[in-house]
Image (spheres, helix red, strand yellow):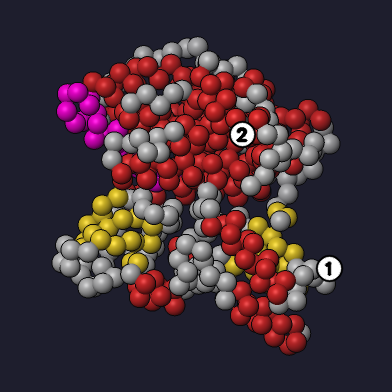
């Protein structure tokens, strides 16, 4: 099937490489987070939440497919969504470090989800007016889904935070543990600067205060305390990961690694 | 021109026979999945379809079914296109689709989503069996991405609600 919208043609190889990398980062964050949520299937605290987490996973993997397919076209080396998802090793993945963190307990998963949902809300909103119409179209579609993802995760954050002492303490502990990965969310590098200059992506520095305000609003409702700022930004978006991604990929990529090229 | 319009009508009728794999009482035309049917300057038939939810597994099945319907109708050289913009909305369901859903036991989408704020409030849903408004949401997520799980306090029956998106 052919897609109608096309990216502006890029003659500058450095610009083309940055464009590919930018789309791949968005794709990888959705893919890795979707895979993590998929690990909950059959294990969630209640059937409704099992379905909820699986629904979110399905949306995220759907978004990742659209983005990976597009990234492969931008790269122009003939890699499709499957090649990019299943045949790259951990250092070639460029997702947010936060997305690859293990599930922990349900509260831990909710905190991770909520931080990324709030981030994706700003990112996709900012991409709506992108000079890249195809990326803008994917963002517009993803934004509709991200809104109810955030409703789900913030709803649980509030119920757990403002719940029993046990649930409050556990979700606060999860927040304290995961907060160190939040500095990476809006830490711009040369790829982001190039995309911003070409009007393909919004300026991350402008999105950060809006994300922060939303986080504070939800935390207040959840009676949770925002941890102190952690300056070290981590570098999952540059391919430097925590040990957890490799283990996750070993499972996710097992079939394609064992039987290369296998099809249903 | 008139002949071309008649041909497009005939192809639309062909596509109106393609059922949604998850909710077979609806056709893909009822669902608003078919975005355009037209002959373009290359002389070929172009059919645009859009996914409902990004990850909906039915999208793949619909694509194959549309291809098969076009082939069977003699349009083997038709170009099948994916349309992402504007994103699919539950407001595109036809009024016929609403009636078919209700008859099938699924509550149709209740009110258009006009703002992100709106999404915070669960809509008032009418029970498709007894028409009572005394219903409550069990879960925002159901058997498919497009449905939520509800129950009716009047007739005590559980039912699916086709969500607004």
Q: Quadrant of residue A256?
A: top right
Q: Are marks 1 and 2 on the same chain?
A: no
**Separation of disc 1 and disc 2 at Cα?**
42 Å
Question: Looking at the rendering, in which quadrant would you find the N terminus of chain A?
Answer: bottom right
- Range shown magenta: A146-168
Residue, disc 2: A255
Chain letter belonging to callout 1 = B
What residue lies at 19% left-to-right and 31% top-to-bottom? A163
Outermost front residue: A259
Q: Is residue A244 left or right of residue B128?
A: right
**Is residue A149 a member of the stretch shown in magenta?**
yes
Q: What secondary structure characterizes most of the magenta part?
A: helix
Q: Nearer the viewer, residue A250 or A83?
A: A250
Q: Which mark is residue B42?
A: 1
Q: Residue at x 53, y 70 (%)?
A: B19
Percent x, y of residue B159: 29, 62
Q: Is residue A22 visible?
A: no
Mark 1 residue element: loop
Above-or-below relation of A153 to B36 = above
Residue furthest bottom as drawn: B2
């Amino acid at each position: 099937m052919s897609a109608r919208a096309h990216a502006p043609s890029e003659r500058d190889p450095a610009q083309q490489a940055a464009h590919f990398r930018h789309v791949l980062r968005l794709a990888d964050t959705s893919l890795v987070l979707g895979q993590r949520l998929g690990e909950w299937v059959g294990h969630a605290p209640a059937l409704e939440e099992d379905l909820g987490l699986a629904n979110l996973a399905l949306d995220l993997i759907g978004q990742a497919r659209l983005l990976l397919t597009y990234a492969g076209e931008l790269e122009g080396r003939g890699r499709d969504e499957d090649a990019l998802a299943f045949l790259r090793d951990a250092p070639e993945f460029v997702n947010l470090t936060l997305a690859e963190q293990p599930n922990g307990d349900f509260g831990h998963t909710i905190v991770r989800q909520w931080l990324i949902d709030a981030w994706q809300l700003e990112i996709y909103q900012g991409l709506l007016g992108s000079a890249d119409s195809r990326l803008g179209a994917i963002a517009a579609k993803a934004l509709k889904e991200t809104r109810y993802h955030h409703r789900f995760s913030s709803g649980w954050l509030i119920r757990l935070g403002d719940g029993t002492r046990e649930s409050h303490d556990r979700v606060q502990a999860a927040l304290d543990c995961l907060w160190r990965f939040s500095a990476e969310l809006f830490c711009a590098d040369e790829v982001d600067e190039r995309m911003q200059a070409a009007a393909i992506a919004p300026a991350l520095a402008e999105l950060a205060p809006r994300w922060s305000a939303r986080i504070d609003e939800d935390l207040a409702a959840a009676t949770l305390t925002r941890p102190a700022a952690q300056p070290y930004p981590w570098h999952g978006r540059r391919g430097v990961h925590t040990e957890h991604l490799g283990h996750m990929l070993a499972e996710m990529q097992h079939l394609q690694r064992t039987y290369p090229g296998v099809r249903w | 021109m008139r002949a071309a319009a008649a041909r497009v009508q005939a192809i639309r009728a062909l596509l109106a026979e393609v059922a949604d794999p998850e909710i077979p009482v609806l056709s893909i035309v009822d669902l608003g999945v078919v975005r355009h049917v037209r002959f373009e300057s290359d002389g070929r038939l172009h059919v645009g379809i859009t996914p409902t939810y990004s990850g909906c597994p039915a999208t793949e099945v619909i694509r194959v079914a549309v291809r098969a319907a076009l082939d069977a109708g003699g349009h083997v050289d038709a170009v099948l296109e994916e349309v992402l913009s504007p994103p699919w909305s539950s407001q595109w369901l036809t009024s016929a689709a609403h009636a078919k859903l209700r008859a099938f036991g699924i509550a149709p989408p209740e009110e258009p989503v006009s703002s992100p704020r709106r999404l915070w409030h669960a809509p008032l849903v009418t029970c498709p069996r007894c028409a009572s408004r005394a219903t409550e949401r069990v879960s925002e997520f159901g058997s498919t991405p497009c449905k939520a799980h509800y129950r009716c306090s009047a007739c005590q029956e559980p039912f699916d609600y086709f969500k607004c998106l």
